Image: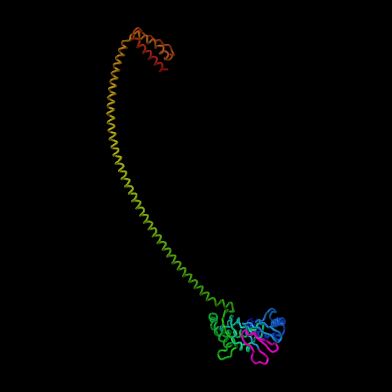
């Protein structure tokens, strides 16, 4: 099974479309110009269907036809060219832009063509000098410059799209020029520089359309020629062509990244150095200020200490003066006190002496009284106190008798009583 050539098939299909567009014939619209407007609209619809367009398409130029039978008026819009011919006349009766006229459908005929600028889209499958397929896309904008020349040489007979045949012819011319130009150019030039293609296409179309270089033109004028895209047909070739560029871009990007990283590192080092220097300077300044503050505080403390020492010295001196004054006062007071004590002692001594003298005198008087007391009084007194003495004495555990001899005399009684008292005291201690 043989493999089909897709490119050849596409070329054949495009050629068939071109031939079909070039063989379009004018629709017989004006043959029924004497019909009412509704019949003319139906005729336009049928002509559009026969030409391959939809029944809803309208003519390219909206021309109004008024009046009836042989007395009709054709109203042409101001942005359309019109040519009006009559049977038996070699030259047209009217030919110009936006010209309205009287129309006799039995002897007259007219053609209306848009005067607006036309745009041809070009898609040219080209082969460059390296035998590689390239799709070149562009557009050509043109307009009618000399309608008297253009309507004689070009086919504007399609009322729905009167420019279709002309656009097809110009498109084929443009594609042929682009293919001829690209076939002599290297691939890199086609992709990088489109000006040679534009210049060649403009020159050739201008020679054809405007008749430059000694040739007779078509009454048309080139407005602009542009190449939009130039795309390599092979995706693998396109990727291969992009690899050096991408690699170069990656290299540049990596070098830029490295350069930026170096700059960032340098900036970081500079920032760290500046930060370290600033930190050292700040620490030094802080230390200097701290030392100054400590020195100021030390001076203040020393001044305060000196002031306190002076105050304490003054206070001690004042206290010493007060103490000395106080001691002097105390000495004076003690002297006064001693004098008073001495005086008091003298008085007490005198009083004591006086009391002693008085006591001596009293004792002398008492002894005198005692000596003067009779024996009978002593006995009588002893008899009175003996019961009280007996009550206070403890009860004896045994009965002992004591004889007192010489009771008749006071000298014998007293020793006997003393002996009794001693006996009673010895019994208490033993008990």
Vertical side of 287 occupied by 124: above or below: below
Q: Position of residue 279 (x, y in %)?
A: 41, 60
Work out whether residue 124 can be spotted. Answer: no
Q: How is the image coloured?
A: rainbow
Vertical side of 368 occupied by 103: above or below: below
Q: Which residues are magenta?
A: 85-112
When asked about the image quadrant of residue 263, the answer is bottom left
Q: Is residue 197 left or right of residue 391?
A: right
Q: Quadrant of the C terminus?
A: top left
Q: Is residue 111 magenta?
A: yes
Work out whether residue 69 can be spotted. Answer: yes
Q: Nearer the viewer, residue 257 or 41?
A: 41
Residue sitting at the far top: 408
Q: Is residue 137 magenta?
A: no
User: How many numbered circles are shown?
Assistant: 0
Q: Position of residue 202 (x, y in %)?
A: 56, 85
Q: Nearer the viewer, residue 80 or 192?
A: 80
Q: Position of residue 169 (x, y in %)?
A: 62, 85
Q: Residue at x 70, y 88 (%)?
A: 106
When asked about the image quadrant of residue 38, the answer is bottom right
Q: Quadrant of the N terminus?
A: bottom right
Q: Residue at x 69, y 89 (%)?
A: 107
């Amino acid at each position: 099974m043989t493999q089909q050539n897709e490119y050849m098939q596409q070329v054949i299909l495009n050629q068939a479309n071109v031939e079909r567009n070039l063989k379009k014939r004018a629709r017989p619209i004006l043959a029924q110009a004497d019909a009412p407007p509704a019949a003319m609209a139906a005729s336009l619809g049928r002509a559009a269907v026969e030409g391959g367009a939809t029944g809803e398409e309208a003519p390219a130029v909206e021309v109004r036809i008024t009046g009836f039978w042989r007395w009709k008026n054709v109203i042409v819009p101001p942005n359309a060219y019109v040519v009006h011919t009559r049977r038996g006349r070699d030259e047209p009766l009217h030919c110009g832009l936006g010209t309205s006229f009287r129309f006799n459908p039995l002897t007259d005929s007219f053609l209306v063509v848009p005067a607006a600028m036309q745009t041809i889209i070009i898609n040219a499958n080209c082969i460059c000098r390296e035998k590689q397929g390239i799709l070149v896309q562009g557009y050509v904008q043109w307009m009618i410059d000399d309608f008297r020349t253009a309507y004689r040489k070009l086919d504007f007979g399609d009322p729905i799209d009167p420019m279709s045949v002309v656009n097809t012819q110009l498109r084929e011319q443009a594609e042929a020029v682009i293919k001829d130009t690209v076939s002599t150019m290297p691939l890199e030039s086609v992709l990088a520089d489109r000006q040679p293609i534009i210049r060649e296409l403009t020159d050739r179309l201008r020679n054809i359309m405007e008749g430059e270089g000694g040739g007779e033109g078509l009454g048309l004028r080139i407005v602009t020629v542009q190449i939009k895209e130039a795309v390599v047909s092979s995706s693998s070739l396109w990727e291969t062509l992009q690899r050096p560029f991408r690699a170069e871009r990656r290299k540049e990007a990596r070098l830029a990244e490295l350069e930026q990283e170096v700059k960032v590192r340098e900036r970081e080092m500079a920032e760290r150095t500046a930060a370290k220097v600033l930190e050292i300077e700040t620490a030094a300044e802080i230390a200097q200020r701290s030392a100054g503050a400590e020195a100021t505080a030390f001076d203040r403390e020393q001044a305060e200490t000196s002031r306190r020492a002076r105050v304490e010295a003054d206070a001690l001196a004042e206290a010493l003066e007060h103490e000395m004054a106080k001691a002097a006062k105390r000495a004076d007071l003690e002297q006064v006190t001693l004098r008073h004590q001495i005086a008091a002692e003298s008085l007490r001594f005198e009083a004591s002496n006086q009391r002693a003298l008085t006591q001596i005198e009293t004792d002398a008087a008492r002894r005198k009284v005692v000596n003067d007391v009779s024996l009978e009084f002593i006995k009588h007194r002893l008899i009175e106190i003996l019961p009280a003495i007996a009550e206070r004495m403890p009860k004896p555990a045994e009965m002992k008798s004591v004889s007192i001899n010489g009771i008749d005399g006071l000298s014998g009684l007293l020793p006997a009583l003393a002996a009794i008292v001693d006996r009673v005291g010895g019994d208490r201690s033993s008990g």
